[in-house]
Amino acid sequence: MSRHQPAHGADSAEAWQPRPWNVLMCDRFDEDLRFMVHIPAAIGKNDAISQARDLYPGGSPLMAAEEHR
């Protein structure tokens, strides 16, 4: 039996490095009002969405994407 461990799996140090994210949000009362929130350092999609909610409590997150440089 062999145990395969990917080089950059969920438990690796590489997976826990904060990266920049962009979160698209809309206003809770006017869904046509959309804006992008830049999160400079988040560990994954859920962390980025949580930080965006903290920064703009009147907004609802629509999607999050890791920023590629």
Image (tube, rainbow, N blue to C red):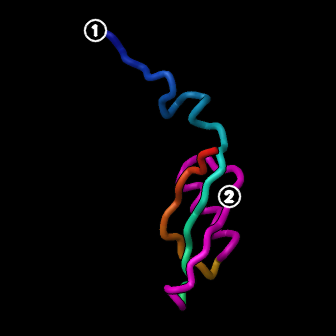
Residues marked 1 and 2 touching at CB (< 8 Å): no
**Of the residues tagged 1 and 2, which is closer to the observer?**
2
Residue 4: percent from the left, percent from the top?
Answer: 37, 17
Residue 46: percent from the left, percent from the top?
Answer: 53, 56
The Cα–Cα distance between marks 1 and 2, rounded to whole angstroms, is: 43 Å
Residue 56: percent from the left, percent from the top?
Answer: 67, 75
In which quadrant of the rendered image does the N terminus lie? top left
Q: Is residue 9 above or below residue 18?
A: above
Which residue, given by chain and number where applicable, does mark 2 sit on? 39
Disc 1 is placed on an element classified as: loop
Q: Which residue sits at x=69%, y=50%?
A: 41
Q: Is residue 3 left or right of residue 24?
A: left
Disc 2 is placed on an element classified as: strand
Residue 43: percent from the left, percent from the top?
Answer: 61, 46
| Residue at the extreme front of the image, as rendered | 69
Q: Is residue 5 left or right of residue 43?
A: left
What residue span does the magenta drawing correspond to? 30-56
Q: Is residue 28 magenta?
A: no
Amino acid bearing label 2 = Ile
Which is nearer the eye, 4 or 24?
24
In which quadrant of the rendered image does the C terminus lie? top right
Q: Which residue sits at x=67%, y=61%?
A: 38
Q: Which residue sits at x=53%, y=90%?
A: 30
Amino acid bearing label 1 = Met
Q: Which mark is residue 1?
A: 1
Q: Which mark is residue 52?
A: none
Number of labelled discs?
A: 2
Crowd class of label 1 (few under 14; some 14 to 19; many from 20; radius 10 Å): few
Crowd class of label 2 (few under 14; some 14 to 19; many from 20; radius 10 Å): many
Q: Which residue sits at x=44%, y=23%?
A: 6
